[in-house]
Image (cartoon, rainbow, N blue to C red):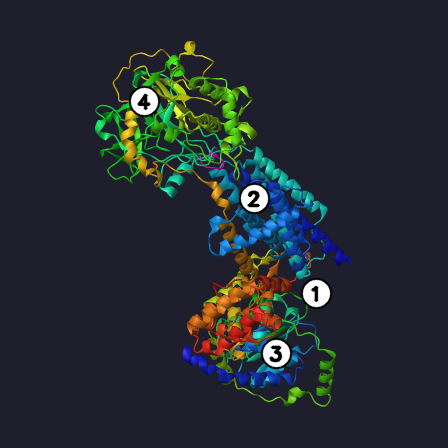
Amino acid sequence: MKKAGKQQRSSILHLFIYGLSFLLLWEWLRPIPTVTNTGHIHVFLWFALFSSILIYFRISLFLSIPALLAGSIYSLHSIFGENPFFSREGGLETLQQFLAEAASNIQLIFSWELAGLTDFFRTFLLFLLLALICYLLYFWIFHTKKIFFFLLATIIYITVLDTFTAVDASMAIIRIFVISFFIMTLLHMLKIQTEERAIRKKDKLIFSTAWMYTLIVMVLIATSVGYAAPKFEPQWGDPVPTIKRLVTGQEGGWGSGSGSRRIGYGDNDERLGGGFIQDDGIVFTAETEEPVYWRGESKNVYTGHGWTSEPMEAESESIFENAVDYYMFHRNVQMEEQRVRILMEHVPGYSHLFYPGQLIDVERSTLEYEIDGRKADDPLAFMTDILSGKVRAEGPNPNARIRLAEYTLTVQTPKYSLEKLKNVSPEDPENIRNYFLQLPDTLPERVIELAEEITADYDNRYDKVVAVEQYFSRNGFEYRTEDVPIPEGGEDYVDQFLFESQYGYCDNYSTAMAVLLRAVDIPTRWVKGFTEGEYVGNTDDGNRRYEIANSNAHSWVEVYFPEVGWVPFEPTQGFNNRLDFEEAEREQNHAVNTPVESNEPEQERPELDDLMSPLENDAFSDYEGPSGGAAFGTGTDTSGWLTAKTVIISIVVLLMAVIVYRRQSRIQNRYFLLQYRLIGSDERFGTAYRRLLRLLANEGMPLEDGETLREYATRVDRMLNSDAMTSLTKTYEKIYYGGRQAEGDWQKQKEQWERLVNALSS
Amino acid sequence: MRSSRESTAVTEPHVYRMIENVEKVVVGKRKEIELSFIALLSGGHVLLEDVPGVGKTMMVRAIAKSLGAQFKRIQFTPDLLPSDVTGVSVFNQKTMEFHFRPGPIMANVVLADEINRTSPKTQAALLEALEEGSVTTDGETRKLQEPFFVMATQNPIEYGGTYPLPEAQLDRFLFKFKIGYPSKNEELEVLNRVQKQHPIEQLAPVLTLEDLINLQRKVLEVYVDETVKQYIINLVNATRMHRSVYLGASPRASIALMKAGQAYAFMQDRDFVVPDDIKYLAPFALSHRILLSSDAKLSDMTNERVVSDIVAQVNVPVGKEAAR
């Protein structure tokens, strides 16, 4: 009776530990929405809870497997289904869908076309994985009473996420530590209790209330001291860029890949959205006459999730004596020339130029750069992408990594004539229309309708553009960098921003503006670069010095005006592109440009249209081809983590781990037998015997303190009901204490040997 | 050297014949007889601590008779003088010379009965004889006979009228053990045997003194591995570290344990010592060589418990890779 009560008590404790480990599992699920595109995380949590309960009550497999299946179908329904589960076509529909999807997806798995697996089935696989993990936790706590591996894995998981992604785990790590302390202490206490009961040393229960209070107080004190104590600043710099460079062999900051990320200038804009972390790491220092936006490149293809572009490059080395052959502005636009100097930091490092306005010349004499990490003076060629305006340096070896360290540029910044902008003809050149009016077929109709609605009252292009630019601030859109959603499934990035979230940061505003304008047939492109940065002082020659950090990374919009060129606009709230700062002449509080009366162009230059046309036949014909060499790093595409492939591999690995864990002693014994059968010899008798001792210790029969081998052998033989151990021990004594060589013992003893190991296995 | 050790096996029956011979007289005390023979084979001496009448004298007489050895008995009394033990020079008026009359110590097997009844001075006279195998009287050192085996008995110290043995002297005994009362059946057997005639009268020698000396030599050849020596040292060291011990066992204890181990292995027809031998003998060889601290004495600790504690705690060497 008393014993039964004790059993009861310890199983409550088990349950408590199991509950704690479930909290740890929660910590695994918690960051998933931040890191990937997975949503509905609460459904996964409920499912995990459900399977934990099933496993805890040790419901037989015949019941629990159907229950788990039903649970996962219900959960799938709550994620994907539209009607209530118990309505006429609710649950049944999901069930039918499940059966159909399962059939087709299993076929896909067998043909190893993992990329083709549907979201529905992937989600199901994730449920399966969760159920398996719940079982593993149960096994760890109730059978082996060891969970350290899981705790360690949790901590590694969280720290890696915190370091490399936008997940902020500073509270999570505290929670994990508290939970881990409890689990480990309680499990250890359980273990001690079991051992003591086995040797009947103590009949008293050690889990007194006082014990628990002591534990709680200790954990609380340790945690609060740890939390309140002063901590060192990180002793090393942020290792992420270095690691990334080592791993990918590429330079560059974090791209605007999907998922959340650190802010910075990257190359991959195919999936926009998600929040980001501020990063004040300096990218470069610039010396200019006035604050300017630093343009890196632009993109022209909107995919529904982000932007891409195919470079169309023209080599421009030969004309550095005169000018770079890429023009943003029509020749009759009034320009102001100035020199800017840029000093790049070592990290992240870029191989292309950042410049304001129109690039005229790169001063070769001031140019400093590194090739593959070493300072070099090999001749550089500059490749200008005439679609995006990206000016990329290329060395003698096109594959070498180039980092421009320092350069001085001659640039021209335009002054626009407002009157001219308002009176341009609506007819765009054909190649402009071809490349800068593209919209995906999936773009929802309501975006186009909204664009028409916004611009309906205006008759000229300039007013239409300004109407769209100001639409956001006038309609309560909010600037926010955290919790910005990522479009899921077939959702459109712009549509989500305009109609659902209505908050976001520069990528949302600029993309939305570019898309809205394209919807009313106004050519636009999406521009990436940096804002003017932080003013830090003057140079000796009177220029202003700015520090541009990762957090200055920015995107905006350029709109094409016939006979003027590409005019930048700034739709993002709170930002101000002071490209040509003349407040007085501005109209409608227009934040970007200050149009002025057109003067005679200062410089003779070819027509933009003319320039585009000769390239049309060669460079443009490669448009469908593979992507050209992007010069800097691709962003982390974390959505790839939850692919069907990784989920399946994880399941297989977990299953194997469970099998190996449960049968490890048998596997070890088999291995041991095999090993010594193969290489067994007299010389190895001693080693083999000692291995046997270890094996026996693993089986719960360790040599006790002060016990001699003979006593031990007698004990083991009594337990295993054999005489093999005594016989082996006699031989071992002869070798080890008798100082004699084993002669022919191996052959004699082999049989004993196998008998003993087999007795152990059974 | 290795090959010579192979031949020791044939000597084993001699030892067992002797043990059986002694068992004709002493009933049910096989373990104690074995211990006595171990001491005999390794040239050590034995201290028996027991109440009178349990067969101490009978055992030592039986051993002497089985060997055909010269047996002397010294009954220690409070007024016994050292010269009563070692012998004395008397003046011969005929030859006008001093003539040495050897004392009872000049024999092969000596029973020193109730050794703690005599004064420390007389006890000290035994000292040299036990360790050196010689006695010195009137400035002349006389070699004792070989083999020389002393079996001393003492009454439990708690009894009245006793002088506790000095530490130095206790250390010179290889073993100290008790004989104890026989069981009821054994006692019945004793009565049956002595009813007509005491069996000791009919006991015949089974071994000559030369045989015994040969056996003693062979015992020295029994192999003791470094690991076993290490185990002995660990055990003895542990007595010095033990918190209940005021004075631990001396290096002489290590030597004694090793020699006893050799003899024990030899008796079991084994030509090398295993830790089991040492572990078995340690309580008999060590418990009289340590002094307990006064705290331990007050808390009812005994020497025997300290030694069995140590034996249970000190790990036996089993090979470097083996897991414990």
What segment carries the magenta color? A256-261
Which marked residue is nearer to the observer: mark 2 or mark 3? 2
Residue nearest the observer in this picture, A754 or B231: A754
Point out residue A16 in the picture as x, y percentages from the top left corner: 67, 48
The chain that hosts pointer 4 is A
- Let me know if residue B90 appears in the view: no
- Residue under label 4: A358
- Residue type indicated by callout 2: Trp
| Residue at point 40%, 12% (across, down) | A582
Question: Dot 2: few (<14), some (14–19), or many (≥20) neighbours within 10 Å?
Answer: some
Q: Is residue A257 magenta?
A: yes
The chain that hosts pointer 2 is A
- Residue under label 2: A28
Quadrant the N terminus of chain A occupies:
bottom right
Q: Secondary structure at mark 2?
A: helix
- Distance, label 2 to label 3, CA atoms, is 72 Å
Point out residue A482 in the picture as x, y percentages from the top left corner: 53, 30
Mark with earlier residue (3, 1): 3
| Main SS, magenta residues | loop
- Residue under label 1: B158
